[in-house]
Image (cartoon, rainbow, N blue to C red):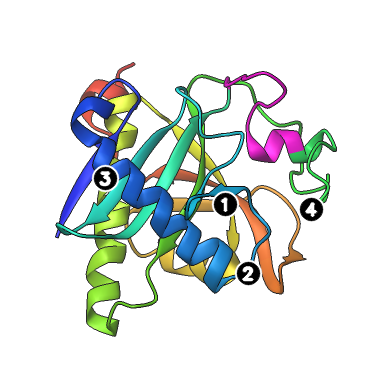
Amino acid sequence: MQSTHITYDNLEQTGGVFTRLLRARHRHFNERNDWDLPHARGMEFDQYDTPESVYCAIHDDTSVKAGFRLTPTTAQSINASYMLRDAQLGLLPGLPNTLLDTPAPRDPDVWEITRVFISDELLSHERKTVYRELASNLASMATALQVRSFLCLTSVTAALLTLKVGFHMHPAGPKCEIAGELCQAYSLKLRHYPASMAAA
């Protein structure tokens, strides 16, 4: 199993993995979770899949086992910025506009994490390994992109797991039920920044 970081600048090398990532997202979110998300040809995508986002895929030679998407809070594409901000502005009917306690930031040092998933086909010990890989990749991408904090909307259960893998996590909004799960917006920060970032 390996990790691949995907950007629109390296799609010539990573395009096959990117396609498999979108197919894995479709299986997880559209089919398994039964979410009503845009899709075509067995691939899930939305208005936030733009050249401003970057991706991580954990995969083998045939399929993607886990992944996530990162989007800067400065993003703007046609009529979309990033999910939590657009929800706060009332642009996403499926989400409440009260997810954040404060105005959604527009800060190059703050990025949003979305479309986090782990395949339910993995065995228990494989899931633990993959979960650590996701956290490790998030940390390395934070360093590479000079990200000081992340915003995410996730289940409260997943948030508790994240505390064990190198992140400080603080609630950024009230708890609410979304698609049958108790969810909350959080702010994540690495516990230890490399010296180059600490001095910035």
x, y percent for residue 171: 63, 53
The answer for how far apart the CA atoms under marks 3 and 1 are is 32 Å
Q: Mark 4 touching mark 1, by CB under 8 A? A: no
| The stretch drawn in magenta includes residue 87 | no
Q: How far apart are marks 3 and 4 (CA)?
A: 29 Å
Residue 50 makes an appearance in the image: yes
Which SS class for mark 2? loop
- Mark in the foreground, 4 or 1: 4
Q: What residue span does the magenta drawing correspond to?
A: 74-86
Q: Which of 43 and 87 is in front in this view?
A: 43
Q: Where is residue 50 in the image (x, y as percent from the top left)?
A: 50, 27
Q: Would residue 96 appear left or right of 162 to someone viewing this image?
A: right
Image quadrant for the C terminus?
Answer: top left
- Residues at discs 3 and 1 in contact (Cβ within 8 Å): no
Q: Residue at the location (28% across, 28% down)?
A: 11
The residues tagged by marks 4 and 2 sit, at their Cα atoms, a distance apart of 14 Å
Q: Which amino acid does label 1 sit on?
A: His
**Which residue in the protein does label 3 denote?**
17
43 in relation to 129, above or below:
above
N-term mark: 3 or 1: 3
Q: Residues within 10 Å of mark 1 (few under 14, many from 20)?
A: some
* Residue at 30% across, 24% down: 197
Q: Mark 3 vs mark 1: give the one in front.
A: 3
| Residue placed under numbered mark 2 in the picture | 34
Q: Name the residue under label 1.
A: 170
